[in-house]
Image: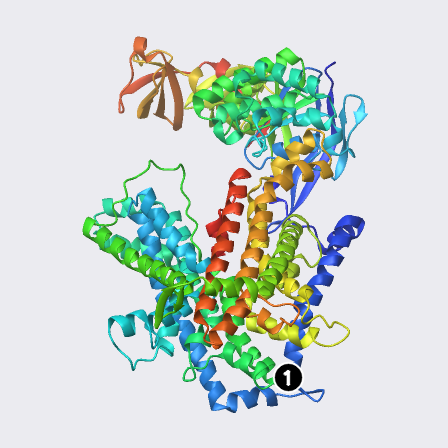
Amino acid sequence: MPDAVAALNPSDRLRKTLRDPLLLSILIILWALLALFIVYPLASLLIRTFTDEGKFSLAGVWGILADPMQRQALWNSLLLGTLVGLCGTVLGFLFAYTAVRTNLSKGWAFFLDAAVILPLISPPFTTAIAMIFSFGPRGLITYDLLGLTSVSVYGLPSTLFSETITFFPIAYLTLKAILAGIDPTVEDMAFSLGSSRWRVFRTVTLPLAVPGIANAFLLLFAASLADFATPLILAGNSFPVLPTQAYLQITGMFDLKGGAVLSFVLLVPAFAVFLLQRFWVSRKYYVMITGKAGAKTEIKSVRPWMRHLLLAVCLLISVSILYFYVLLFYASIVKAFGADFTITWKHYHVVFTEGLQAIRDTLIIAGIGMPLGGIYSVVVGYVVCKKDFVSRRTMEIVSMINYSLPGTIVGIAYLLVFNDPPLMLAGTATIIIACYVFRYGPTGIRTTVAILQQIDPSIEEASSSLGANSGTTFRRITLPLILPAFFAGLGVVFIRSMTAISATIFLISINWTLITVRILEKMTELELGVAAAFSILVVLIVFIVIGAISLFLRLFRQPGAPDMANILGG
Amino acid sequence: MEAVRIRLEQIHKTFLHRIKGEVTAVKNVSLEVEPGEFLTLLGPSGCGKTTTLRMIAGFERPDRGRIFIGEEDVTDLMANRRNIGFVFQNYALFPHLSVFENVAYGLKVQGKNSADIDREVAKVLELVGLTAYERQFPHQLSGGEQQRVALARAVVIEPRVLLFDEPLSNLDAKLRVYMRGEIRRLQKALAITAVYVTHDQEEAMAISDHIAVMNEGRIVQIGTAEELYLRPEDAFVAQFIGRINALPAKVLTVADGTVTLSLFGRDFRLTAPPDGLAAGRMIQVFIRPEAVTLTRETGGDLLRGIVVERTFLGEKADYLLEMDGGRLSATAYDPLRHGTFAVGETVGVGIESGIIHILKGEEE
């Protein structure tokens, strides 16, 4: 009955931990890092929010809530998050259902996947910029095609549209996994009991997918709540949201405390989502227990006309995504989009002269953060999954915090803590790298844990029975098996280092800047062509790196190892 | 290498279960496996057989008691120092290594040079018939092939003992029968002491020199397949090995080495009964279904029964009979020659005194 083996009792665990010097020193280092880069900044943020001249006070929070403008921002953030959650989930479900239940040919499936992946790996402004090129005052569609001059691209509808396009791939990946996990024989069974297709969908497929749908909604809500780039460009003055308000409070009014309080207000719904996901949705998943893998059944849940309709809708959306990217590229090679369509390389010239520092800095930061993030992910994942020690659960949860919080909160918290001696790290590459490692490492941690949980303990026992000691077993068996997680952790940290902005915009300096920040600057300076060129460059670099990592993953592919698409979705 | 003896002395093991609290998996088990013997631990799931095996391997440490392999006390030795070969239920092949690398793993750990490794791996792969598979990876193999790799990997290091944890339970029925023959052949060829765990009594009977039947953490009876089948010492063994009728009978008289019982309204005289039977007591007696004879004639000494259920199985047919005072299972072989009985038919039931089995101290 080895499966009945349970955890040691706490005192045995403590004794065991203290007896293993290697584990003990790893734990001390990890806890020191987690305390410094996760717990301490967040605690400082809370303290700053709730104290006034050293005493506990709610004045700061009341001050914000009393301000109609800030109240409006809170309301707007929640409204936008809910709408993006709803629209994105519907769109994601549509795509996922089409991908899983309509017998797509390989080519079609690849096309849909590729179109959907694009927004996930792009810098955050890409769709926003393309929206302006399309629907702005001199936009291709509004001005050139329809001849409209008085429409405004700024506000809720365009922000909603842009965020939905940017984030729905998250819902797609989540729901695709859920739908693919539903055994089609269960649907066959419902058919055989005399249900119509619609009834099968309503009474079998949809209920089984509900936990996934709830999860997708929460993920999108959180993503929209945290999104800083899109509203900054598209929301305009009439539609303030919390992350941009917090940013403006700090950069425009140099009010660090006001920024801290605003980000606390943002933290409340973000934390609620985190709790809902962790303690509610994750328990609602249905486990599909099927004895033997059934004979591959022809999936009959969709009528031919329905199949065509679904495909047409997905195609339309994929094409509009591709249209955005083509437009972006076009804007990067013409003199002045909307006015002068002469082909020119001058924007790229700017990128590679004036912008060279940002490119170099970003690549250095991403390049250093990449291996560190990979190692951090694998070590934390291994320790949390395989070792039994005091504070194991706590470590698992703490390591996830920065990942779950909106970047604005993390950025402001870091700014509070690392802007003064003794830890004056603001403006250095160190702090930007640390931010990325602790914020994006958790994807790799999850992958490590997922892989380790799939490695049967008997594999390590087999190695032991063949005479290998625990060191040899780790080196020759465990390590090669979790290598894909290392690459996953590494890849995500790299991609996010190239594309993120919400946290690090508070941490850049004259000495260290980032491409994404330059894109933002060029947007505000109305040098849209240069911004487009920068964006295209980032997409290209990320594409190349993802290609390389995918190749590696395929070379080292283990049973149960995730592929790149799933990693991005997590 | 000389085959060695395995000896367990009073080993005891408890686990802390998440829900049930402390659970005793193995209760003071003592056992000796002779050099070169093939011993099977047989029992239902949760009986402690796998835990016992894992303690011999060194994956679990007993709370009390000692374990000896050969003359060496290995109780405190880690698994990697015991020099054992272990075959897992799920094979536990290293998924990232090829067949060759899987088999070579233990030799590499021993630090052998690559020429020796090549030679020894080739030899073992030939022994299990996988010579052409060296470069394949585990996921490219069928279940039976994976099992043979696991076997090769376990024996290539020339272990002192071979341990098997339900190695055939993931294979289909035909392959299971074939592979158990292969395992037995290999163990005999290597003349190595083996302990085998299974819950399948037929497999245990086919493969073992001796079988130790376990129940609720204890060894209930050890013996050859024949001994366990013909002379079970315990109701659990009687019912776990093969099928058996457990029937209530009344003791009529006990005198000088014989006992008279009343069963289905008929008197039976048994010789050499166990001690402790008293006249007038109700006891439980056991009868194997295949020991009962069924005939179309119903006269003479025969009891009468009505067929309630019939299961036709090809070489035999199982019947459930309604008797005077209870139900009885009976099996009739060779239905081709003898024909079958229909449900509702009244048949003659022959029960000889010799087939009635009374357990020691088994009184109701």
| Residue A503 drawn at (x, y percent) | 58, 70
> In the visual, does B278 lie left or right of A300?
right
Residue A467 visible in rendering: yes
Relative image position of residue A453 (x, y in whole percent)? 57, 46
Q: Is residue A337 above or below residue A442?
A: below
Secondary structure of the residue carrying numbered label 1: helix
Is A230 on the left-hand or right-hand side of A401?
left
Q: Quadrant of residue B102?
A: top right
Q: Which residue is mark 1?
A: A50
At which x and y percent is residue A193?
Answer: 23, 46
B287, B304: nearer the viewer: B287
Asked whether residue B259 appears in the rendered view, the answer is no
Height in image: A59 above or below A497? below
Mark 1 belongs to which amino acid? Phe
- The structure residue drawn at horizontal position 49% and vertical position 59%, both measured from the top left corner, is A537
What residue is shown at x 68% (from left), y 15% (from top)?
A: B36
**Badge 1: chain ID:** A
State whether residue B130 is above or below residue A479: above
Mark 1: few/some/many CA within 10 Å (<14, 14-19, 20+): some
Q: How is the image coloured?
A: rainbow
Q: Quadrant of the N terminus of chain A?
A: top right
Which residue reaches farthest top? B337
Q: Decide which of A427, A437 is in the foreground and name it.
A: A427
Question: In the visual, does B35 lie left or right of A489?
Answer: right
How many marks the image carries: the answer is 1
Q: Looking at the image, which residue sits at the far left?
A: A305
Q: Position of residue A126 (x, y in %)?
A: 43, 65
- Report the residue at 50% width, 13% height from top: B354
Is B281 in front, or is A37? Answer: A37
**Horizontal side of residue B45 vs A158, given as left or right:** right
